[in-house]
Image: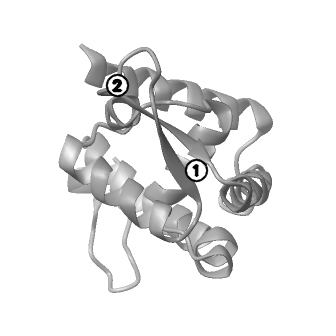
């Protein structure tokens, strides 16, 4: 067992077996990169970024579909969509086939912001992943996606 100590000299090796702890620690620099490249310059929180990019790739998705994709409760996705609509980034369009359903579309401003943020996201994490080879990066993403699929069971 390798003893790892953080800046204050605390041995973290007792937590090495926990995926959750490892993910939480790895998410710290990833969140910092997001804030620096997308969050502050574009005024987006991670979940708002995700919604905009999902809508860019899936025009006309419903709130229910977005809630399922993000594992959010219906009231939470509604609040998020309301905020993005108030900022002029998306609009709801009543379904012609099912008048109870609303399809969500990006406005021109929302589409432009989604495109810009998505383009930045493709390279912003390179600095965090610089110590990994290309193969290791691909493996890491593949393994994380495999673990994430557990939520659908």
In this rendering, position of residue 133 left or right of residue 14:
right
Q: SS class of the residue under badge 1? A: helix
Nearer to the camera, 7 or 139? 139
> As displayed, is residue 28 above or below residue 107?
below
Q: SS class of the residue under badge 2? A: loop
Nearer to the camera, 89 or 17? 89
Residue at the extreme bottom: 8
Mark 1 or mark 2: name the one nearer the start of the chain: 1
Residue drawn at x 74%, y 55% as measured from the top left: 108
Nearer to the camera, 53 or 92? 92
Instruction: Quickly name the residue at label 2.
Output: 99
Residue drawn at x 74%, y 29% as measured from the top left: 135
> As displayed, is residue 84 above or below residue 114?
below
Is residue 73 in view? no
Answer few, some or many: residues within 10 Å of disc 1's Cα (few below 14, many 20 plus, some between 14 and 19): many
Nearer to the camera, 16 or 46? 46
Instruction: Quickly name the residue at label 1.
Output: 52
Q: Quadrant of residue 68?
A: top left
Residue drawn at x 52%, y 50% as measured from the top left: 91
Query: What is the CA distance from the residue labelled 1 to the residue labelled 2?
Result: 24 Å
Q: Position of residue 11 (x, y in %)?
A: 27, 68
Q: Position of residue 139 (x, y in %)?
A: 62, 27
> As displayed, is residue 19 above or below residue 5?
above
């Amino acid at each position: 067992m390798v003893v790892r100590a953080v800046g204050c000299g605390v041995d973290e090796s007792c937590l090495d077996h926990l995926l959750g702890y490892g993910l939480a620690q790895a998410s710290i620099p990833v969140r910092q990169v997001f804030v620096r490249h997308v969050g502050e310059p574009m005024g987006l929180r991670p979940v708002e970024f995700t919604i905009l990019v999902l809508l860019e790739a899936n025009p006309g998705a419903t709130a229910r579909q977005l809630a399922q994709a993000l594992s959010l409760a219906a009231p939470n996705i509604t609040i998020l969509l309301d905020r993005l609509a108030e900022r002029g980034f998306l609009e709801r369009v009543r379904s012609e086939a099912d008048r109870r359903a609303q399809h969500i579309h990006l406005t021109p401003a929302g589409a432009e912001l989604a495109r810009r943020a998505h383009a930045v996201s493709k390279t912003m994490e390179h600095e965090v992943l610089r110590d990994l080879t290309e193969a290791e990066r691909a493996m890491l993403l593949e393994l994380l996606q495999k673990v994430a699929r557990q939520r659908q069971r």
